[in-house]
Image (cartoon, grey):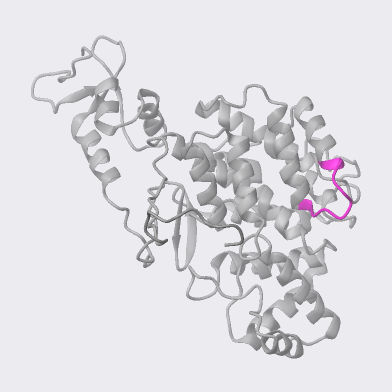
Amino acid sequence: MSEQGGSDSPGERPRLSTRQAAERLGVKPETVYAYVSRGLLSSRRSAGGRGSTFDAVEVQALADAARRPAAAPRQAAPDAMSVRTGITLIEPDGCWFRGVDARELAAAHTFEEAADWLWTGRLTPGLRFAAPPPLLDAARTAAGALPGHCAVTDRLRAAVVAAAVADPLRFDLAEEAVIARTRGLLAVMVGALPLQGRGPDGDDAGAAGGGLVRALWPRLTARRPTEAFVRTLERAMILLLDHDLAASTLAARVAASARAHPYAVVSAALGALDAPLHGAAGAGAHRMLAEVVERGSATAVVAETLRAGRRVPGLGHRIYPGEDPRARALFTWLEEVPACAGALAAAHEIAATAGRQANIDLALAVLTLGAGMSPEAGEAVFAVARTAGWVAHALEEYGERPLRLRPSGQYTGPRPPRPLPAPGE
């Protein structure tokens, strides 16, 4: 078939060239092939063997779908932005990554395998992420220069910025380059955190070649873990990979819409995560849980929290009408970790006393408290895990029209013209 389109054989439905398909979809030619890799389009080599052809009806259906608002499983607010995504589906009883139940993925695979599935829709058994030495050195220097009182997430942000400066090829937004860069960045983020203890296999790096989660463990706690502990942390991180358009994920997509490189995308998301109503919510759940364990009863702690006019952390979720299914799964896995028994019982007592369902923050707090981690450790776990999700959304956004996530403001100030203000006004 020539570049003019047509069909490969008489009587067949019309087919389009790559250029024609890209024009109809309003994207770049390379994005058309990205749609093929994600299963959104099918392609076929042209009769002459030069280039690919695409079913015109299939292309038109995808173009029409892009112009329609996506059906939402829940009622959106009147002014809410709707963004089409093929990454995560959330329903009242669970969430699915590219159609696969997140809980099943967590039970069967490593963090690296699950992250790569989120990016590519392919499973690569035994995948490991390695930190490029120049980037790791820069990140450790930057993170290590911060004051001692800095939170672990402050060090992660510094590490990401330093890694970006050390990477001269960071502006390469080809899908393969972004994925390779993110694999290295995740390892850099973990490696830039100071050690609190020794890894599961006794080495300071947290089991060389043993995976990202094993390397992260000794940077969060000095306590020696069991295999059940490490595997439960890994499962928790897989559950946290993505959760649709949370505030930090939207920040990541806005940055990607402006064609920011992946380090800048992650930096933007980390800025949104550093907020009391998002990533920092887990620290409150950890502190409350620790107080309940110490006092031996949840009643007084919950009552005092409510009396002070504060919400009980770790309970309820704006998306799930009942218990957060991620929390339910993590609670089940935590039953296999004897060191978490006291914290787990306290978490269930908190939910029963307050008469509300637990969310993932409370379940993660059981893990961090049982492991002897600081209250801020849960935010670090969240940040490292969600980095994979932020980049998955960035990859989608790179395939969309640039700067499309630019809403218009509704001006409510005084109408011009007005005189120049006088001093003191």
**376, above or below 45, in the image:** below
- 4 and 279: which one is in front? 279
Magenta residues, dominant SS class: loop
- Residue 82's image quarter? bottom left
Q: Is residue 247 visible?
A: yes
Q: Given the current orientation, which residue lies at the most extreme left position?
A: 11
Q: Which residues are magenta?
A: 143-152
Residue 151 painted magenta: yes
Which residue lies at the image location 25% right of the left edge and 9% below the top edge?
A: 48
State the quadrant of the C terminus: bottom right
- 187 and 136: which one is in front? 136
- Residue 335's image quarter? bottom right
Which residue lies at the image location 53% right of the left edge and 49% below the top edge?
A: 251
State the quadrant of the N terminus: top left
**180, above or below 229, in the image:** above
- Residue 409 locus on image (x, y percent): 40, 54
Q: Is residue 211 visible?
A: no
**108, above or below 203, in the image:** below
Which residue lies at the image location 69% right of the left edge and 65% below the top edge?
A: 282
- Residue 149 locus on image (x, y percent): 87, 55
Which residue lies at the image location 68% right of the left edge and 80% below the top edge?
A: 348
- 407 and 139: which one is in front? 407
